[in-house]
Amino acid sequence: FGPGEVRNHPFPAAGVYDYHCTIHTGMVGQVGVYPLVLEGPATRIRRGKTIALGVRAPDGAGEVTIEADYGSGFVPVAAATPVVPGPGHQGHDAPGELHAGVVATDTATYRAVFSGGTSNELRVEVTDAPDLSARVRRSRRGSVVTVSANPVTPGGRILLEVNLRERFGWWPVKRARLDKRGQASVLVRGYGGAQARAVLVGPDWASPLSETRAFRLRG
């Protein structure tokens, strides 16, 4: 693949296929090929909220069931239907995509099942940590990010992370503590236009408990 080059490759059968870079030693990955593709949240979900799941299925798939494994095997928990998406289904907009909602009670692994086979497995972690949100405004000195926790969590530890290409992922650049209103503001310089997120962490300043959606710093 050259820079910016895109190629298509048809896979003859379901399975997990390895791939590697012929230039960079150790740069490897896998492509999972399934008759159904299950999509869902990439972040932790607060207990009691609804987990929005999307299923990409072939035409004429028929009945598609969502199953969950809470630690003792998969059991049916919902049916995927072509209803109009509700909150949380942003991105589940492929033509013919099916949708399902499951109330988050405990951490579980989910999969979609129909007569033609089984989807990939999707693990969703459930937490009792507060929901985090962030807003960004531009100042003369950089980006001011204000983080809010719901419910209010005074003293909570916040890491502001930036997605750095040279670091191959998220990298902490600022620390803060939530005040008595459950808010914290930080000034970020030098990362204009970069993707960022705020993460609520444990006493070790490392273990993630909750996080915001990714957002862009002003530049």
Image (cartoon, rainbow, N blue to C red):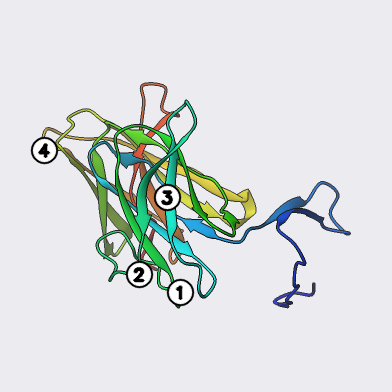
Badge 3 marks a residue whose secondary structure is strand
Badge 4 marks a residue whose secondary structure is loop
Say which residue appears at 28% left-offset and 53% top-offset.
145
**Looking at the image, is 175 positioned above or below residue 169?**
above
Residue 149: x %, y % from top left: 20, 41
Badge 1 marks a residue whose secondary structure is loop
Say which residue appears at 82% left-offset and 55% top-offset.
20
Residue 101: x %, y % from top left: 30, 53
Say which residue appears at 22% left-offset and 28% top-offset.
155
> Is residue 71 something one can see in this rendering?
yes
Distance from the alpha carbon under mark 2 to that under mark 3: 14 Å
Judging by the rendered image, the residue that carries numbered circle 2 is 82
Which comes sooner in the sequence, label 3 or label 1?
Answer: 3
Which comes sooner in the sequence, label 2 or label 3?
Answer: 3
Distance from the alpha carbon under mark 4 to that under mark 1: 40 Å
**Looking at the image, is 83 positioned above or below residue 198?**
below
Q: Nearer the viewer, mark 4 or mark 1?
A: 1
Q: Amino acid at mark 4?
A: Arg
Q: Nearer the viewer, mark 3 or mark 4?
A: 3
Badge 2 marks a residue whose secondary structure is loop
Residue 193: x %, y % from top left: 44, 67
Q: Quadrant of the C terminus?
A: bottom left
Q: Are marks 2 and 4 in contact (CB under 8 Å)?
A: no
Q: Is residue 138 left or right of residue 197?
A: left
Judging by the rendered image, the residue that carries numbered circle 3 is 66
Which mark is drawn over residue 94?
1
Distance from the alpha carbon under mark 1 to that under mark 2: 11 Å
Q: Quadrant of residue 64?
A: bottom left
Distance from the alpha carbon under mark 3 to that under mark 1: 18 Å
Q: Quadrant of the N terminus?
A: bottom right
